[in-house]
Image (cartoon, rainbow, N blue to C red):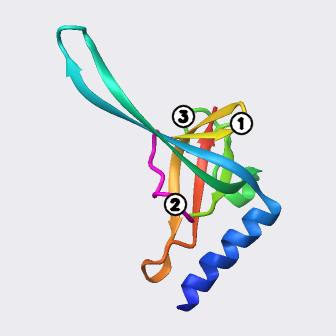
Amino acid sequence: MSFYDEMATLADELLREFGKALTLRRVVPGAYDPASGTSAETVTDYQGTGALFEYAMLAAGQTWIPSTLIEVGDKQCLLSPAGMPLPTTGDKLLDGAEVWQVQNVKAVNPAGTPVLYELQIRK
């Protein structure tokens, strides 16, 4: 086991202990059916563990102004990559009954080993 594999395992253990269960939902549009005027969607849910945090203005390095990168109400999610694909913009994050839209994704991925996903999420 490499050093970064150990770090990924440690991050997962800490998020399981201090975080909570979260679901990453990916919706992939299917082929358009001109006869019915609809397209089928494929919805895939990935069960994971993470922690949600409020953005601190100084820590984020951004201001909370509409049409900027971080807006009022946005949250930061630290998500374990264990059993989880790399989230993409447009995915949804489910926290119980709350549904958040993934706005931005940063993968902590040294030497090709995913250790942590940092998400910016918005309602």
Asked where in the image residue 27 lies, by quadrant, the reply is: top left
The x and y percentages for residue 30 are: 28, 30
Q: Which residue is mark 3?
A: 67
Q: Main secondary structure of the magenta part?
A: loop
Marks 3 and 2 sit apart, C-alpha to C-alpha, by 20 Å
Taking depth in this image into account, of 108 and 65 the one nearest to the observer is 108
Q: Which residue is mark 1?
A: 73
Mark 3 Cα shell of 10 Å, populated few (<14), some (14-19), many (≥20): few
Task: Tell me the amino acid under the disc marked 1.
Answer: Gly
Task: Tell me the amino acid under the disc marked 3.
Answer: Ser
Residue drawn at x 44%, y 49% is 88
Residue drawn at x 42%, y 78% is 112
In this view, which residue lies farthest toward the top? Answer: 36
**In the rendered view, does 48 fall on the left or right side of 28?**
right
Residue drawn at x 57%, y 65% is 82
The dot on residue 106 is: 2
